[in-house]
Amino acid sequence: MNYVKISADQCKGCRVCVQACPNHCLKIGSVFNTMGYQSAVFIGEDRCTACGICFYVCPEPGAVTVFKNEKPQKKRDTGESA
Amino acid sequence: MIKHKKPTAFYETFERKGHNDTSTHYCPGCGHGTVHKFIAEAIDDLGVKDQVVFLSPVGCSVFAYYYFDAGNIQCSHGRAPAVATGVRRVHKDAVIISYQGDGDLAGIGTSEIIHAANRGENITVFFVNNAIYGMTGGQMAPTTLNGQKTLTTPLGRDPGRDGLPIGMAEIMNAITAPVYIERVSLSSTKGVLKTRKAVRKGLKNQIDGRGFSFIEILSPCPVNWKMDPVEAREWIAGNLEPVFPITCFRDACSQDQKDSQIAVEHSVESDQIPFMDDKELVSLLKVDALIPNLEILNLEEDQLVKIAGFGGQGVLSGGVLLAKCGIAEGIHATWLPSYGPEMRGGRAYASVILANDEIGSPVVDEPNVLIAMNGPSLDAFEDDVVPGGFILVNSSIATRKVKRDDVSVLYIPASDIAKKEGLTAAANVVLLTIYLKHKGIMSTETLRKIIPVSVTRKKFINTNLRIMDKALEYYDNNVRI
């Protein structure tokens, strides 16, 4: 499967990736990070194509990492429990 | 497998003040981060990380040096293209990224960008246009839209009062030399991916030595536009793009645009830039007859010289003479003047360093040689001289003796010696001659060769040379015993 890892500490919750993802694989989470932003979380295990659009639209250098054909090692990697 | 991740042209952590060292200082939804990412990715993919010189501007992107693991020069406001020109002249292989915002490029540095483009410098300019001055809180910029409300146009920009928004890409397109001009936008996913392509193309052009590339990027500033990041992107599409059309104005590097072939011919090939070594420069200035080919001098000790006096005494020109002697001897020399607003009579001093190795700073705080041409300068600097240093006093004017006993001192009535030959202002030559002779720094013949080159009023050259002879005569008769 493909998945996207969002670094909760770097994400500023701007929603640009949420809006840009063609398969609606991302949403804004409910938890605040250390900077006080609600970071994006990955919810598209079944439909992510690892196209990288979220990576390119994201204004942070390292907030988004896109994995292709790999299983998330921990549930946390998708950002859901962040 | 990782398909997309943070490019390695970024530092792993960003050492800035504050607790979070992994994210940028940019506001949520800012376009800078995206453009940074594309530049970093292109640097990675083109494999030029070691050659990159990133020129960060004044504006929010001033802190680019915290992020890019590359060479960096932080330029004065608007001057990045001028700095880029300088870097290009000295580093043929550098990949120069001139990164500017719209206040910087279209407002404060309009002249620099136009002339750099007109010279066809082989550089890549990224122009991030967000239609306002972002860092200072959102004031009107030359690119602000008609009617757009900013901090300085609370009722909206009025074209009658403030003019119309400037299209920089259109201005670039009126110049022949650039090889690639494109305007892109971060308003949509498609625009973002086009921006990525344009960034890569701009850098590739430079690496291939094709010439000047200009990429204008319409970029959101959600905070100053008072919108959320998604709205801001929609606002670009609805408002900025109609005024600043998204198009490729010129791409001389692709096959289908034949007429722009001229542009390629106009662009400066980096090989053609004349590089001159010192010898060529000397012959160009027609001073080769005067400067003999000397063996490179080896100083026993670096000379940190402070020449002090009042304006008009030849303090500064004396420093220049000494520095030129050092250069003629093949050693490193710097000269740094300091003087008040008065042309004559005010306090003036010059710091001169003569050294075998390259000189880091031209400032002399603790001189080992003080040439005091009057009393006040002896008072001011006597205590600064390092123990074991040398103080040379113009005893015609400074009447008191040096109080310290841990320095060597020589009293020379320099103004009197010069006055006798009819040129009081040449007291500096007397003191320099005696300094060189007494300390055995270099042959006084070097000074004799330099005086004709350095003295601006040619009718005094012979008088200066005669005064030099008198100084040597005085030294032989009164000092060397």
Image (cartoon, coloured by chain):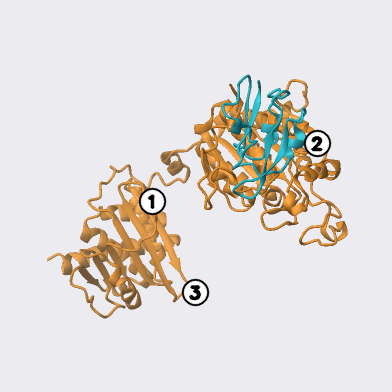
Chain colours: A cyan, B orange
Q: CA distance from mark 3 to mark 2?
A: 56 Å
Label annotation for residue B342: 3
For the point 65% across and 26% down, the residue is A3
How far across and down, in percent of the image, does residue B315 sit? 39, 67
Q: What's the chain of the residue with tag 1?
A: B
- Which of the 4 quarters of the picture holds residue B469? bottom left
In this rendering, is residue B333 above or below B370?
above
In the rendered image, which quarter contains the C terminus of chain B? Answer: bottom left
Residue underneath mark 1: B360
In the rendered image, which quarter contains the N terminus of chain B? Answer: top right
Residue underneath mark 2: B246
Q: Amino acid at mark 3?
A: Glu
Q: Are marks 1 and 3 on the same chain?
A: yes
From the viewer's side, name the closer residue of B246 and B79: B246
In this rendering, is residue B256 above or below B280?
above
From the viewer's side, name the closer residue of B108 and B99: B99
Q: CA distance from mark 2 to mark 1?
A: 48 Å
